[in-house]
Image: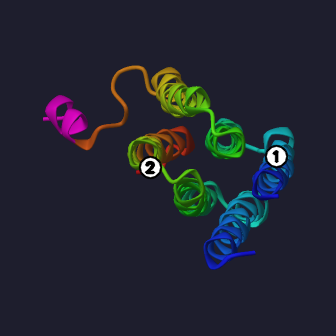
Amino acid sequence: MSVVEGIIAGLLVLGVFFYVAGTVGLLRFPDTHSRLHALTKADNLGLGFIVIAAGLHWGDGWIAGKLALVWLLTLFAAGMAAQLVARAALKAEGGE
Amino acid sequence: MMADLFMLTALCILISVAGALIRAWRGPGRADRMMSAQLIGSGGVGIAVLIAAARSEPAILDVALVLALLAAFAALAFVKTVTPEGAGDPEADEAETP
């Protein structure tokens, strides 16, 4: 178990931790908007750690760039989706 | 050994995504069910990245990219059904109200 493999293992554990935190947040939070908040941010952080671990494990620069692109796309998609779903939920509740 | 670690992580994320289905089952509002679908999307992206890293197969990264894109479109489609006239865009509302 070299140092790099230890780092990779640590990053993976962190990634899983934040995914589980996102899921627990989705299940436990009281109302729609706080769930949306937890879900969007925790998952992307978990994905960020996983992307870094995968990049380290793979060792190829181009693939690390492609992994970073996957993460960026998910970040933008989640940010956009969270805004829109929050507005839709607000409108559905009729509140302004 | 490292590839097995990635596969184990993918399994843990799959279990956490399965946990999200409870919200889809119980979710009072349509937005909650949409959120669990969105979590399944981003969990799927994580699993695709992990499997791509475990097998060192760049093709699976394309799967992750497409899944991330489709998850975004799913959220967009949901918003379009709930608020057809515009996505509740404040600027659009101001344009209509005066």
Instruction: Specify the quadrant that holds the N terminus of chain B.
Output: bottom right
Secondary structure, magenta segment, majority class: helix
Coordinates of residue A35 in the picture (x, y in percent)? 64, 59
Q: From what the image shows, is residue A66 above or below residue B74?
A: below
Does the magenta portion include B96? yes
Cβ atoms under marks 2 and 1 closer than 8 Å:
no
In this rendering, the label closer to the viewer, 2 or 1: 2
The amino acid beneath tag 2 is Ala
For mark 1, give the secondary structure.
helix
Does the magenta portion include B22? no
The numbered mark 2 sits on a residue in which chain?
A
Counting other residues with Cα less than 10 Å from the Cα at mark 1, is it few (<14), some (14-19), or many (20 or more)?
some
Name the residue: 49% across, 32% down: B72
Residue B24 located left or right of residue B35: right
Coordinates of residue A1 in the picture (x, y in percent)? 75, 75
Residue range highlighted in magenta:
B91-98
Q: Nearer the viewer, residue A68 or A18?
A: A68
Coordinates of residue B63 in the picture (x, y in percent)? 59, 27
**Residue on which the image places disc 2:** A64
Name the residue: 77% across, 51% down: B3
Coordinates of residue B11 in the picture (x, y in percent)? 85, 49
**Residue on which the image places disc 1:** B14
Q: From what the image shows, is residue B44 above or below residue B8?
A: above
Identify the coloring: rainbow
Q: Nearer the viewer, residue B23 or B41?
A: B41
Q: Marks 2 and 1: same chain?
A: no
Name the residue: 33% across, 26% down: B86
The numbered mark 1 sits on a residue in which chain?
B
**One can see residue B22 in this view:** yes
For mark 2, give the secondary structure.
helix
Residue A14 lies in what quarter of the image?
bottom right
Residue furthest to the bottom: A3
